[in-house]
Image (tube, grey):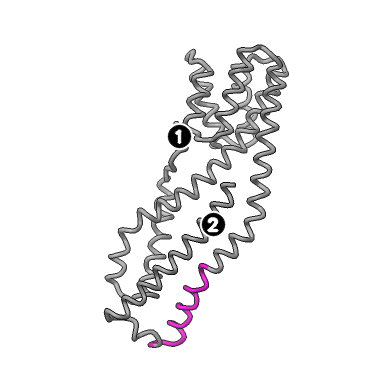
């Protein structure tokens, strides 16, 4: 099953991000160096580009999984309330989640995995522990601990699960509000990151020869390289600040 500690690119994503990286390499090579050699020197940075993309995509994937997991808990609680056994409640939750999100949704695949192994007499606790380990999410691990305790203690099983689902739902809603508040900030950051490149492109297209003194000589290459490093450092700083806010 899927390991949520790292992101796995599909073939389509590999092609998409290769073309995106190639475009950026061509753009930077043209704007800062006007050199084909620069393209060859930048190609080895493609794995770094993929790693940066993977970090952002993994964050989005975990947000999606968290939302679906919250809905799954609610579906399990509803099934238990309707009289299903614990194992059958998880089987019933798969049907509801598939209707809600489709057969290819992350949580539907996880529930399918649980359903198959339950039919092979694998303990539910073992399957949920495996999912908690792979998900790398605090909410999933906390729920599993509460779930196992409630199952063993024989207390208000349904009430405990519903309370846990509500708590996770409140946390997800707060995260969603934070993401909405940060959307404008991220847009501003993206615009500020694009502006220097747009200015360089505009001057190169409208004033041919304006930057010729900086191209094709060692001094110019050093100056443009320093400018590129400053630009990349500013981009990395803006991304780091946004990630720090999200981590709060």
Q: Position of residue 116 (x, y in %)?
A: 50, 21
Q: Position of residue 47 (x, y in %)?
A: 35, 53
Residue bearing the label numbered 2:
241
Identify which residue is drawn at 54% across, 46% down: 60
Residue 89 lies, with reference to residue 101, above or below; the image says: above
Quadrant that contains the N terminus: top left
Q: Position of residue 111 (x, y in %)?
A: 55, 27
Residue 125 lies, with reference to residue 53, above or below; the image says: above
Residue 230 figure quarter: bottom left
Is residue 112 shown left or right of residue 35? right
Whether the magenta-drawn stretch holds residue 116 is answered as no
Q: Quick one: label 2 or label 1, which is nearer the N terminus?
A: 1
Question: Which disc is residue 2 wearing?
Answer: 1
Residue 151 figure quarter: top right
Q: Secondary structure at mark 1?
A: loop
Over which residues does the magenta segment extend? 193-209
Closer to the camera in the image, 21 or 10: 21
Is residue 121 shown left or right of residue 39? right
Q: Secondary structure at mark 2?
A: helix
Residue 171 lies, with reference to residue 50, above or below; the image says: above
């Amino acid at each position: 099953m899927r390991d949520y500690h790292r992101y796995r690119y599909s073939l389509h994503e590999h092609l998409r991000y290769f073309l995106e990286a190639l475009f950026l390499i061509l753009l930077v090579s043209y704007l800062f160096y006007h050199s084909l050699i620069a393209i060859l020197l930048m190609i080895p940075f493609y794995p770094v580009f993929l790693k940066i993309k993977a970090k952002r995509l993994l964050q989005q994937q975990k947000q999606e999984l968290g939302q679906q997991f919250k809905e799954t808990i609610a579906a399990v609680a509803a099934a238990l309330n309707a009289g299903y056994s614990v194992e059958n409640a998880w089987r019933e939750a798969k049907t509801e989640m598939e209707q809600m999100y489709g057969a290819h949704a992350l949580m539907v695949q996880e529930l399918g995995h649980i359903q198959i192994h339950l039919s092979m007499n694998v303990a539910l606790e073992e399957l949920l522990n495996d999912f908690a380990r792979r998900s790398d999410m605090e909410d999933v691990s906390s729920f599993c601990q509460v779930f196992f305790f409630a199952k063993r203690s024989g207390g208000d099983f349904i009430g405990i699960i519903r309370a846990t689902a509500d708590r996770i739902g409140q946390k997800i809603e707060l995260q969603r509000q934070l993401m909405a508040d940060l959307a404008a900030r991220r847009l501003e950051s993206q615009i500020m990151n694009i502006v220097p490149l747009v200015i360089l492109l505009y001057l190169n297209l409208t004033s041919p020869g304006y930057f010729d003194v900086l191209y094709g000589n060692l001094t110019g290459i050093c100056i443009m390289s320093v400018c590129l490093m400053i630009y990349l450092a500013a981009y990395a700083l803006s991304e780091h600040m946004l990630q720090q806010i999200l981590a709060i």
